[in-house]
Image (cartoon, rainbow, N blue to C red):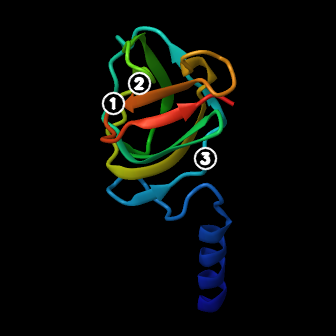
Amino acid sequence: MKTILLSMSVLMLLACGTKKIAGDGTGQTIEMKTEKRLTATVGKSEMSTNQTKITSASIKGNKLMLSISYSGGCKEHSFSLVGDEAISKSLPPHRTVYLIHSGEQDLCKAMIMKDLVFDIKNLAYKQEKGSEIFLKIDGWEEELKYTFE
């Protein structure tokens, strides 16, 4: 009987494809699958944002991949990427970009790790093949060079 209960418990933990480690919001770590593709916009980033740590950032083609972590686990969280309307007059130009995190006042304490993929065509200097711009993501130290494809 104990063997059956143990086997069922292990199967239940392994069956959850969206979480690496099951968490109940009490301080455990939860690793989430990549969220559906999101689209960056250009505009004002006057929205308030929940605390988020960017753990990696890279650009491949017209996509920005971000690995992030934040606390929560009890409510739905949403993310958007907003590029500042103003760009520098240098060549190539520079644009500041903000990751906006809305967490609906999630008071749980699980550490959530998630990968986000953003279509960043709207952040290009010009939407012409080979057009270059440096993106400075708020919360990430190094600028990323984006070449429109």
| Amino acid type, label 1 | Asp
**Quarter placement of the N terminus:** bottom right
Query: Mark 2 and mark 1: span between their CA atoms?
Result: 6 Å
Q: Nearer the viewer, residue 7 or 105?
A: 105
Label 3 sits on residue: 34
Name the one closer to the observer, 145 or 81. 145
Q: At 46% across and 19% down in the image, what residue appears? A: 82
Image quarter for residue 132? top right
Query: Residue 40, how many percent across, how many down?
Result: 56, 23
> What is the tally of numbered marks visible in this picture?
3
Instruction: State which quarter of the image contains the C terminus.
Output: top right
- Mark 3, Cα crowd under 10 Å, few <14 / some 14-19 / many 20+, is some
The kind of secondary structure element at disc 1 is loop
Q: Position of residue 6 (x, y in %)?
A: 59, 83
Q: Which of the two labelled residues, at mark 2 and mark 1, occupies the earlier sequence position?
A: 2
Relative horizontal placement of residue 80, taking residue 102 as reference (left or right) = right
Residue drawn 44% across and 29% down? 134
* Between discs 2 and 3, the one toward the N terminus: 3
Which of marks 3 and 1 precedes in the sequence?
3
* Mark 2 Cα shell of 10 Å, populated few (<14), some (14-19), many (≥20): many
Residue 21, label in figure: none
Query: Do the CB atoms of the residues marked 2 and 1 lie less than 8 Å apart?
Result: yes
Please determine whether, in this image, residue 97 is positioned above or below residue 5: above
10 Å crowding of disc 1: few (<14), some (14-19), many (20+):
some
With respect to residue 61, does 104 lie above or below? above
- Relative to 147, say whether 54 is above or below: below
Q: Quadrant of residue 119?
A: top right
Q: Nearer the viewer, mark 1 or mark 3?
A: 1
In the rendered structure, which amino acid carries the disc numbered 2?
Val
- The alpha-carbon separation of the residues under discs 2 and 3 comes to 20 Å
Label 2 sits on residue: 97
